[in-house]
Image (tube, helix red, strand yellow):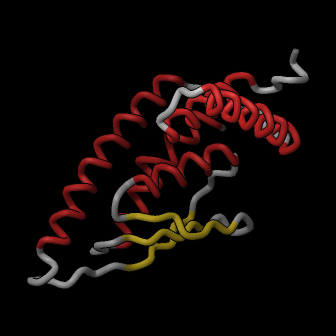
Amino acid sequence: MRYWFPYPLLSLALLMLWLLINQSLSPGQVVLGSVLGVVLAWIMVNLQPDKTRLKNYGVIAVLAGHVAADIVRSNIAVMSAILRAGKRPINSGFVTIDISLRDENALAVLACILTATPGTAWLEFDRQTGVLMIHVLDLENGAAWSELVRNRYEAPLKEIFE
């Protein structure tokens, strides 16, 4: 059974996502979604992802709260930047940040956090130097962004993953 369903939760999640995207519970969509879920789970086996051991569940809750608050704040900041664009031009720019995260899963979560926060985008990460480059829509102080990413996101992710 494990051969046919190497990642059963992934297969089920992909089936649910397929049905939600297609907004249909027809037998054809269920069969097609099931086949896709199983095939993509087999592909996942070939990728051989590293096993992740989460270490501090309390920090996960705190980090989730910080991310939720930052997303709300960033939405408001982007809205105000757009509304005042005629009065004061938007000063977008790039920020380079030295980070010491090395765990692939922690880096992936950091990328999701930065990309999901309106007004910021993960652009590039150099593994050899540990330099992350992000784009900020309304950049006023690059050093403040560096400190924010290091203290608010990188430090908790280190506690969780490393």
Most extreme residue toward the top, as rendered?
A: 1
Residue 38 figure quarter: top right
The C terminus appears in which quarter of the rendering?
Answer: top right
51 left or right of 61 in image: right
15 left or right of 89 in image: right
Q: Is residue 24 above or below residue 121?
A: above
Residue pictured at 60% horizontal, 69% vertical: 124
| Residue 71 percent across, percent down from the top left | 32, 49
Most extreme residue toward the right, as rendered?
A: 3
Q: Is residue 43 above or below residue 114?
A: above
Residue pictured at 15% horizontal, 65% vertical: 80
| Residue 49 percent across, percent down from the top left | 79, 40
Most extreme residue toward the left, as rendered?
A: 87
Q: Is residue 13 above or below residue 134?
A: above
Q: Nearer the viewer, residue 26 or 61?
A: 26
Total labels: the figure holds 0
Residue pictured at 51% horizontal, 72% vertical: 96
Residue pictured at 13% horizontal, 71% vertical: 83
Residue 18 figure quarter: top right
143 left or right of 127 in image: left
136 left or right of 3 in image: left
The N terminus appears in which quarter of the rendering?
Answer: top right
| Residue 116 percent across, percent down from the top left | 42, 52
